Amino acid sequence: MSTDVTTIARPYAEALNRLAREEHAYDAWSTTLAFAASVVSDSRVIDLIDNPDLPDGQKEKALFSVMGDYVSLEGRNFIRLLLSNSRLHVLPEVYRLFELLKDAEQGVLEAQIHTAFPLTEKQCDVLLKHLESKYSRRVNASVHEDAGLIGGVKIVIGDSVIDATVKGQLQKMAFTLQR
């Protein structure tokens, strides 16, 4: 995502984060934003939103007919705000940033686990328990396979990288030998 879109989306995400915290409504806002972001990401909806000949009122009516009852009154008001400010295109980024803020607020870390081979469910559970113990926080992880790692696992959490891959060890050894 470009920094311009992120810069535009950040104040909206921060405002929604404050609102969700005050109302104890993180789950409701997550659900609403996820659904609305998926709707406005559809190519047909993008064409509708980008149509300069269509007034905002008709765009709004079309959007809400697609969204049905899946979006609360507060969610509709938020979408109206974005639409009136010609910012509806940033909704997927607002959702992404909101989720990051929510996770930080709730003490959840996002981890990317890179493995050379598929992990079993039990291996994933054990790895997550170790990470949660190490960081004293709940960890949500996404697992990615990368045969180029040869073996082992690389874990990325924020700016921290734990590289226990064969490829990483070989690179470290090569660097040491070149000194």
Image (tube, helix red, strand yellow):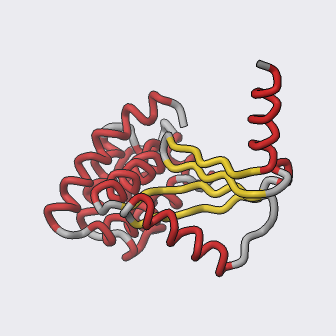
Q: Is residue 174 above or below residue 118?
A: above
Question: Which percent across, then down, holds residue 102?
Answer: 33, 58
Residue extending furthest toward the top: 179
Q: Position of residue 148 (x, y in %)?
A: 85, 48
Horizontally, is 39 left or right of 18 in the view? right
| Residue at left offset 82%, top offset 30% | 174
Could you tell whether 61 is left or right of 16 in the image? right
Q: With 34 as the anchor, is 42 left or right in this view?
A: right
Q: Furthest-left residue in view?
A: 22
Please tell me in which quadrant of the rendered image residue 63 appears.
bottom left
Q: Nearer the viewer, residue 118 or 96?
A: 118
Q: Name the residue nearer the viewer: 5 or 177.
A: 177
Residue 34 in the image: above or below residue 15: below
Residue occupying the point 53% across, 56% down: 111
Residue 47 visible? The answer is no
Residue 74 is drawn in which quadrant?
A: bottom left
Q: As drawn, which residue projects farthest toward the bottom?
A: 122
Question: Is there any visible trace of residue 99 in the rendered image?
Answer: yes
Quarter of the picture holding the C terminus: top right
- Image quarter hosting the N terminus: top right
Question: Residue 17's spot in the image, x, y percent?
Answer: 26, 54
Numbered disc total: 0
Q: Nearer the viewer, residue 12 or 77?
A: 12
Q: Position of residue 19 (x, y in %)?
A: 19, 57
